[in-house]
Image (cartoon, grey):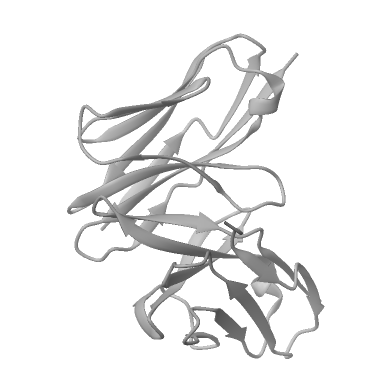
Amino acid sequence: EDQVTQSPEALRLQEGESSSLNCSYTVSGLRGLFWYRQDPGKGPEFLFTLYSAGEEKEKERLKATLTKKESFLHITAPKPEDSATYLCAVQDHNTDKLIFGTGTRLQVFP
Amino acid sequence: KAGVTQTPRYLIKTRGQQVTLSCSPISGHRSVSWYQQTPGQGLQFLFEYFSETQRNKGNFPGRFSGRQFSNSRSEMNVSTLELGDSALYLCASSFRNGGTDTQYFGPGTRLTVL
């Protein structure tokens, strides 16, 4: 059965303190892995799509990487405005369903 | 391009009532998916519609139903509401690019069942 596990559940960082969020997945066939950012009371905002192991994508202070079993979202020198819940999702090649993890709630303090 | 819109944004209903939520996808997107989000369960997939046909379905009871119109707009209906149906209901529209379906979410409808 397809499964997505994100860790840690919550992360508190000081402004400028770099860190990484983890997304481990089990899927019969990976069509793509997605990262989203969600602010309280709002819908998830698309960040990245990764297709195959070894791929990397960057956007401002965020960098996403992918291996055959997990993905990392690296946050370099975070700012308070990076505070949000970050969601990871995988799309199964056979069913086309998108399976979401429960997210990592990131808080960045000045 | 305008994003995904959902109406209404907030709803308060009582147990036993029914509710209909609406979603207008991004122009040109033919696929619409619905999710239920609760603090304990995260994002749970309800169903997906493509060209007016249900293409995928999650593990929700038959009280949850949906449909899609010829202009790709979609509605979901929940009948005989229960307290546990209180949640943020999210709609996402998508298109296939590079072999994957990138989903773009609306702001959601916050449903409270009393």
* Quadrant where the image shows the C terminus of chain B: bottom right
Is A59 displayed left or right of A29 in the figure? right
Q: Residue furthest top?
A: A16
Is A68 displayed left or right of B39 in the figure? left
Where's residue A108, x and y in %?
67, 21
Is A44 displayed left or right of B86 in the figure? left
Identity of the residue drawn at 50% across and 82% down: B71
Identity of the residue drawn at 54% across and 68% down: B25
Quarter assignment of residue A79: top right
Q: Examine the rendered structure and indicate whether residue B104 appears above or below residue B28.
A: above
Quarter assignment of residue A95: bottom left
Where's residue B89, x and y in %?
62, 67
* Quadrant where the image shows the N terminus of chain B: bottom right
Where's residue A76, x and y in %?
51, 14
Where's residue A100, x and y in %?
43, 52
Q: Examine the rendered structure and indicate whether residue B40 appears above or below residue B18.
A: above
Is A98 displayed left or right of B91 in the figure? left
Identity of the residue drawn at 79% across and 74% down: B11
Quarter assignment of residue B75: bottom right
Q: Examine the rendered structure and indicate whether residue A72 appears above or below residue B33.
A: above
Q: Relative to the observer, which residue lies in front, A30 or A62?
A: A62
Residue B42 in view: no
